[in-house]
Image (tube, rainbow, N blue to C red):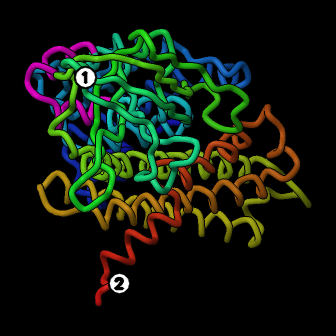
Amino acid sequence: MGETLAELTGRFKIDYGLSEEQKVLRYSIRDFAENEIGPRAEELDEKEEFSLDLVKKMAEMGLFGIVIPEKYGGSEMDYLSYCIAVEEIARIDGSHAATVAAGNSLGIGPIYYYGNEKQREEWMPRLCRGEILASFGLTEADAGSDAGASKTSARLEDGQWIIDGSKIFITNSSSSISGICTVQAVTGQRSDGRKEISCILVPNGTPGFEAKKMTGKMMWRASDTGELYFDNCRVPEENLLGKRGEGFKQMLQTLDNGRLAIAAMGLGGAQGAFELALRYAKEREQFGRPIARFQAISFKLADMATQIEAARNLLYKACKLKDSGLPFTKEAAMSKLYCSEVMGRVVDQAVQVFGGYGLMKEYKVERFYRDYKLLTIGEGTSEVQRIVISRLIGCYES
């Protein structure tokens, strides 16, 4: 399934202006994903098994803390490099791409960007080494797209935050190496009558904090997804992340970053499904010739390739804006929307190319078909992305 470094270098030399380091990174992650994750992906998916061994290997590859400075144990790369790494893992398996994406954007990100130096020094090295994973406790049963409707509360008493409530669909939150959760909670009322929302660091294992693994998922079955429960859970006042009342702003900025990684998952998944379909179309014969030579199939593959190319250009532009310190919220939303929906279109047509075989678990394309759907829901649904984009292009100006 892989290309040589020379082939990859040639293909990406002019198109995207990648540095030599980024090209080598792509090749090394591709090789790792094909040889370490690929052979185990089907079994782990079937068993709904979260692999601690593969997490360790991904950590050894430097995939956690990839954009974090070396002083905290990170790899100190740019965001485009991070998204290339996620893209290449997603090309093979969505579950492990999700572990890396959530581990960085939603787990490590808030602590690095909004934590104080003491919090960074306490948590970042272990997170970057992959000894523990961090999660972001945002979604609740009645607070999904309407994140401001959170009911989980935290009150300050005698130098401690007392947290009560619950969260759901939280990635990397319930495994044996889940170490800490950034919990969004209502900490009071603002002067304008709205909820005051803050983020608080809660270590796993804290009395009153329980994380339960969620099973029976359609997609990302080898990733860790948990339900979180807080019952009179007490943590020190110093566990507040940033300033009190800035939790909603922190959440929005965290999701901006996370949307780039989700877009990378969509791009990588689309690329993987396309390659499977192309190879199959060249091998599968009907009426005495490979089905790739029939216009009905060749046009499907041409459309897939075109949409993937457009998606990659859009995502890489958004990453370069972020790396340049320029506004990228609109482009992040566009990338997340487009790349996730492109994967949906590509995997749908890929299954069509496989015909009946595409519906069988023994063929990898079936897993890609299941995995894509969450990309249009998680970290802001496609509908929410369209709201964000329409606002930023001036549709709601008075």
Give the number of the disc on residue 175.
Answer: none
Residue 206 in picture, x, y percent from top left? 38, 11
Q: Secondary structure at mark 2?
A: loop
The part of the image, by quadrant, that contains residue 1 is: top right
Q: How many marks?
A: 2
Q: Secondary structure at mark 1?
A: strand
The part of the image, by quadrant, that contains residue 50 is: top right
Residue found 27% across the figure and 44% down from its top = 247
- Please tell me which residue lies in front, 215 or 294: 215
The local crowd at label 1, few if under 14, some if 14 to 19, many if 20 or more residues have their Cα within 10 Å, is: few
**Height in image: 194 above or below 216?**
below
Q: Looking at the picture, which amino acid does disc 1 mark? A: Glu
Residue 4 appears in view? no
Q: Looking at the picture, which amino acid does disc 2 mark? A: Tyr
Q: CA distance from mark 2 to mark 1?
A: 42 Å
Give the number of the disc on residue 396.
Answer: 2
**Height in image: 128 above or below 362?**
above
Return the residue at label 1: 157
- Please tell me which residue lies in front, 303 or 326: 326
The part of the image, by quadrant, that contains residue 302 is: bottom right
Residue 102 in picture, x, y percent from top left? 41, 34
